[in-house]
Image (tube, rainbow, N blue to C red):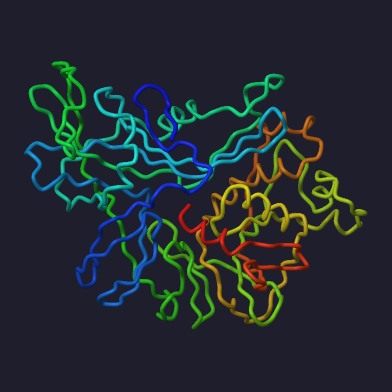
Amino acid sequence: MKTLGPRFTAISVVESLNSSPWTIEHRCTQCGAPINLGETDRFFVCPFCRVQMCLTTTDYFRYYLPAPDTAVPGIFYMPYWRIKGMAFSCDGDYEVRQSLLDATHRASDHPFFPESLGLRPQTLKLRFATAETGADFVKPSMAFDAAFSEIQEGLPLYTRADQPTSPFYRTFIGEKASLVYAPFYIRKDVVFDAILDEPLRSTRLAGDFSLSRETVDRAVKVLPALCPDCGADLEGGRESIGFFCTNCNSCWYLTGDKLERIPFFIMPGTNGDSAHLPFWCIKARFQGIVLESFADLVKLANLPRVIKKEWESRPLFFWVPAFKVNAGLLLRISRTVTINQPRNTAEAGASPALPYPITFPVHEAAESIKVIIATLMTMKKKLWPILKDVSIFPVESRLAYIPLKRQGHDLIHSPLQLSVSVNSLKYGEHL
């Protein structure tokens, strides 16, 4: 656990998954039965009425830590930003460093409240914050970007004495934000923690102290997990943001507050005991670097291949996993498949066998392209200083399923020289 400045305690950089997942108390909208959900759950089946549901929201999810039943009157809920994802840094020693960033930060500039929730959300159950809750929610006065900047300032810099302290490029890829509200109350101008029923500090509030309230009107939307085309049950995992209909052979992506049909194709591959892993196949336009064709990629990465004439006009696609894995494995898989540039050929009318859940959003996959390029560059001393000036504009994206054959504890695709550990997939389910 890191300490980021005075009184700021958070899980800031985690190299291994040593924190417990959050638990959200919810009720089935069909039968009202109580359900415990994980923070990353977007698809669930009610254990009582067996109805399948998808969870979504138009911007970001809002949760609150309920005050104890014995709490005193006058409780209000202060907002905290939750920030979770993968942090990448292209450092001065020409290494790409990555870590899991997991932190909470106060969404206001009032110094009387803790800057972080610490481990509390992992030890207590949360609930979705909605207008129907009837709680007194305080309006955030600090934007997400400002809170994220303060967290970044506390992150360690991986540098050597003979290297510059500032990295060439830093980025964050992941679940950008959610809001978590924590309960407090005020007695005799002193702020109390409503969960512990203890004062935060002996300092009394100033006479002009005030907090703006808000109505949480962006409720969680629950959609039936049914194919919008044929009405059949959709298939997916608990963390899925994309679903497959085996009845009409269609794929649906959870975006905003609706299910949107997306194009997909299935690469021909091995038969028998195989599983299909989903990938985002992204074509992009670049500014600040020449990278339009497969030939450009061969030159950039200095691949041991003789450039063919047709490669000059062959479009370049970046292949990024549509499933969550740790940051280092994400780069390795993306680099391996992108270098091999699989052809966008599909088996006519085919359905993916044992399709793995889609859990990594396409916009986050697009944000990872610059880091993938950084790992591909061979002339790092010449090209890394210009990374910050390179702009990337995705122009096309498709979902592709790649078949991998099960061999022991690994999934293998020999032609692509691709190997993915089954354990790494299990690890990624909670990222």
Residue at point 69%, 68% (across, down):
412
Residue at point 41%, 78% (across, down):
233
Residue 122's x, y, as percent?
A: 33, 47
Quarter occupied by residue 104 = top left
Quarter occupied by residue 119 = top left
Residue at point 39%, 61% (across, down):
42
Residue 182's x, y, as percent?
A: 24, 39
Quarter occupied by residue 159 = top right
Residue 211's x, y, as percent?
A: 19, 29
Left or right: 289 in relation to 66: right
When the figure is inspected, residue 414 is found, relative to residue 93, above or below; the finding is below
Q: Nearer the viewer, residue 148 or 8?
A: 8
Left or right: 16 in relation to 161: left
When the figure is inspected, residue 238 is found, relative to residue 275, above or below; the finding is above
Left or right: 117 in relation to 408: left
Residue 86's x, y, as percent?
A: 53, 44
Q: Nearer the viewer, residue 83 or 14?
A: 14
Q: Which of 138 and 91 is in front in this view?
A: 91
In this rendering, the count of numbered labels is 0
Quarter of the figure with the N terminus: top left
When the figure is inspected, residue 159 is found, relative to residue 178, above or below; the finding is above
